[in-house]
Image (cartoon, grey):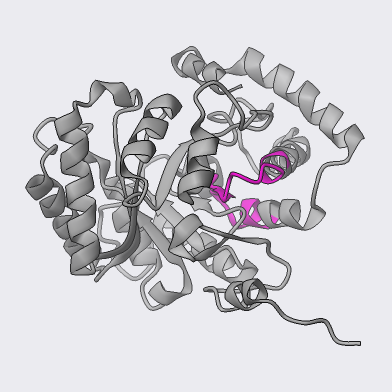
């Protein structure tokens, strides 16, 4: 007996760096199929992995991947590609430069999301269409990239700080970049879910993708109505900060630390909890080692949480909120 193949099956198998044991999800109306766990641009606690906190993503190593930081990024990206993780989201100038280098010779193996936030509307002087397009063009040139798959502009964490004129300029810049072919798809990020919803309701046809915090244990339904809007307008959603700025963990990130195995399990449970939310296309943790890539992939393969595992995660989340740093107390709004 043969099983009929669907267009969805074929779409997944044509995606970049397809791996049969990876879960791929449709990124809204882009039609791209991206891995349910993808690679966020941040590299927090990387000093625990490479043995030094002195990194310069802009610096030119004496030879290809000669310094520990660039070698680490090259190896992590390679392991992602081998395992079927096929989306990278970079959101600072340093991240764009570092991942542009790490992708040299294998750019077509992943979908790349681009935001050089230092040249975007969170910074005064970068809030017009022309300045935003200038920032994109400069960033591509500096990173040695011809195009990006997703240009997703970083807006204020509290999006309501932006005027309507600034939103209009953002949308105009995204539309023109898409028309020029310097990006294939477009979107934006903010921590203000009610404001994101309002922009989607106004510009649903123009917005392909959004990024916003989504922590394990968070519920998609809520008074902000965001997930109703993304469903109606077929917008892809990347969930950021899945580890609550590392408050999820007991250890300090050292690979040989006494809490390493327990923290690996915490990470897997958290990712599996988020993957259970249909509205989230992909969670994008910052993976700082090959081991962390393997652990994230294991989370995908372990599948949905059992009831005992869900109870275990609930207890972990209770502990997590007690460790949340004061400067990230705003994350409590995403419970």
Image quadrant for the N terminus? bottom right
Q: Residue at x 58, y 45 (%)?
A: 280
Q: Position of residue 202 (x, y in %)?
A: 32, 38
User: Between 92 and 162, which is closer to the camera in this rendering?
Assistant: 162
The answer to whether residue 256 is above or below residue 335 is below
Task: Please state, as top left, top right, bottom left or bottom right, where the C terminus lies in the image.
Answer: top right
Q: Residue at x 37, y 46 (%)?
A: 204
Along the line of sight, the residue nearer the viewer: 1 or 286:
1
Answer yes or no: is residue 241 visible: no
Residue 261 lies left or right of residue 209; in this view the side is right
Residue 85 position, x and y percent, is 58, 63
Residue 65 located left or right of residue 79: left
Q: Is residue 283 above or below residue 247?
A: below
Rendered image quadrant of residue 65: bottom left
Q: Position of residue 220 (x, y in %)?
A: 61, 32
Q: Nearer the viewer, residue 87 or 32?
A: 32
- The residue segment tinted magenta is 273-294
Q: At x 49% / y 24%, what residue is drawn? A: 224
Please identify the residue farthest to the bottom as the structure is shown. 1
Q: Is 62 placed left or right of 111 in the picture?
A: left
């Amino acid at each position: 007996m043969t099983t009929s193949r669907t267009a969805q099956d074929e779409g997944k198998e044509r995606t970049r760096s397809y791996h049969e044991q990876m879960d791929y999800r449709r990124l809204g109306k882009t039609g791209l199929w991206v891995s349910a766990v993808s690679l966020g641009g941040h590299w927090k606690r990387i000093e625990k992995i490479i043995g030094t906190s002195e990194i310069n993503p802009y610096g030119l190593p004496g030879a290809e991947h000669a310094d520990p930081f660039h070698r680490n990024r090259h190896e992590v990206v390679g392991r992602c590609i081998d395992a079927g993780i096929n989306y990278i989201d970079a959101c600072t100038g340093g991240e764009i430069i570092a991942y542009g280098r790490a992708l040299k010779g294998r750019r077509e193996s992943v979908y790349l999301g681009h935001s050089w936030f230092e040249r975007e509307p969170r910074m005064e002087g970068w809030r017009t269409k022309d300045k935003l397009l200038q920032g994109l063009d400069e960033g591509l040139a500096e990173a040695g990239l011809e195009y990006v798959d997703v240009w997703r502009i970083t807006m204020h964490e509290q999006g309501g700080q932006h005027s309507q004129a600034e939103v209009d300029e953002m949308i105009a810049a995204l539309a023109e970049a898409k028309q020029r072919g310097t990006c294939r798809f477009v979107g934006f990020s903010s921590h203000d879910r009610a404001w994101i919803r309002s922009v989607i309701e106004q510009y649903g046809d123009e917005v392909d993708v959004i990024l916003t915090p989504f922590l394990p244990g968070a519920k998609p339904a809520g008074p902000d109505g965001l997930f109703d809007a993304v469903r109606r307008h077929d917008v892809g959603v990347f969930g950021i900060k899945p580890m609550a700025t590392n408050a999820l963990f007991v250890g300090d990130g050292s690979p040989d630390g006494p809490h390493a195995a327990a923290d690996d399990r915490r990470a897997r449970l958290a990712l599996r909890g988020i993957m259970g939310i249909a509205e989230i296309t992909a969670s994008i943790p910052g993976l700082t080692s090959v081991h962390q890539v393997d652990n994230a992939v294991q989370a995908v393969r372990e599948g949905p949480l059992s009831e005992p595992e869900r109870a275990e995660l609930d207890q972990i989340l209770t502990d997590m909120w007690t460790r949340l740093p004061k400067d990230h107390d705003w994350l409590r709004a995403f419970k």
